[in-house]
Image (spheres, helix red, strand yellow):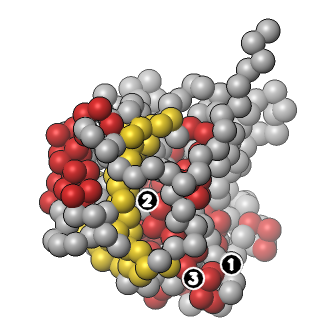
Amino acid sequence: MITRLVEPYAGLGAYTVRAMAMEAQRTNHRRYRLEPPVSRMGSKAGFAAGVFRAFGLTPARWAGFWLNDLDPVCHLFHMVYASSELRDAVARRIWAMVPCPECHPDVVVQALEGKIKPTPETLPAGSPGCSQCLGTGTQNDRILWERFKSEPVPGGVVDASARALYLQSRSFQLKPVSIDGKVWLEQLPAWVTCGFQPETRPDDPDKNYRTANPRWSCADNLAQFPPAGQMSLTQQDAALCLPTGDSSDCVVVLDPPYEATSGYASTSCRADVLMLARAWSDAGALVLLHEACPLADELGKGWQSRSASILRASRSTFWKGEEREFLTFNRPPVWWPAEQQTMGW
């Protein structure tokens, strides 16, 4: 089964990344990273594997990918996905963020040249009075974050992508980091005065701290990415991502910003989302539509909706019933996991 994957509201492109890795692993007989290099609110990384299995797409042969998103940071990430050379250059920039540029300038140069991949454990201590590393030899993550946030967005794709990945890795509660002109933005709730999330967390057994995702792991993640294959990138209103002919070889994943939510750089009205779903379905594609509510009744005959929370890979708040995720589709699934029922006493 030769298939093309289309993500008009791609975000981090979680479905595309998994499909890229599946195809590369089948071809090259080695393992690749199955998820985007950083996490972000609304990413479907936890759903992709379950959804692929539910619709019989695990053995699919992926011939091409179309990623689209208006958000400039997401578009930067997509460009990184599409080029192994760009990924290597961005990874080097991120590794060069680890050593203190004042205390270890030679290590910074070696990291940029790709000769070493420094981590705090490999770096000697710095000068006790250093304002960049506070004597540790490693650039202080809070100082680095403050500097990047205050400086204009770099003009080059490599520097801008490296900083975007770093800022997203440190974003409070995975809130989206975006760009407005030359200024970095974080979509934070009103009660948050600072979006910074530290790289290290206190060892407190009474609190459920999220696993830290330090900057050097972002570079490691890029180094584990699969070959891009045939990838098309666009940055336009998703309503323009219409089929141009017979699309019976396409799987279209629609994951728009959910209605009545905030935190995204761009939004899309429900009418546009439903129009896209119908257009691709009429062109022969398998259409999978994520939302916080079922949309089959609005789309009409031939559409079905199911709660997709059971498809999520990890036992998160979805499994606890605190969040709901629905999948609406135009073809019946080939498999669906049984939802665990309570015993009733």
> Which disc is residue 12 wearing?
2
Q: What residue type is labelled 3?
A: Ala
For disc 1, the marked residue is: 31
Give the crowd class for mark 2: few <14, some 14-19, many >=20 residues within 10 Å. many
Q: How far apart are marks 2 and 3 (CA)?
A: 19 Å
Q: How far apart are marks 1 and 2 (CA)?
A: 20 Å
For disc 3, the marked residue is: 24
Residue 198, percent across and down? 62, 46
Residue 340, percent across and down? 71, 31
Q: Can residue 96 be seen in this view?
A: no
- Give the mark toward the camera: 1 or 2: 1
Q: In this view, does 131 lie to the left or right of 171?
A: right
Say which of 259 and 250 sits in front: 250
Give the crowd class for mark 1: few <14, some 14-19, many >=20 residues within 10 Å. some
Among the two numbered marks 2 and 3 on one chain, the one whose residue lies closer to the N terminus: 2
Q: Distance between the residues labelled 3 and 1?
A: 8 Å
The quadrant in which residue 218 appears is bottom right
Instruction: Give the SS element for disc 2.
Output: loop
Say which of 81 and 203 sits in front: 81
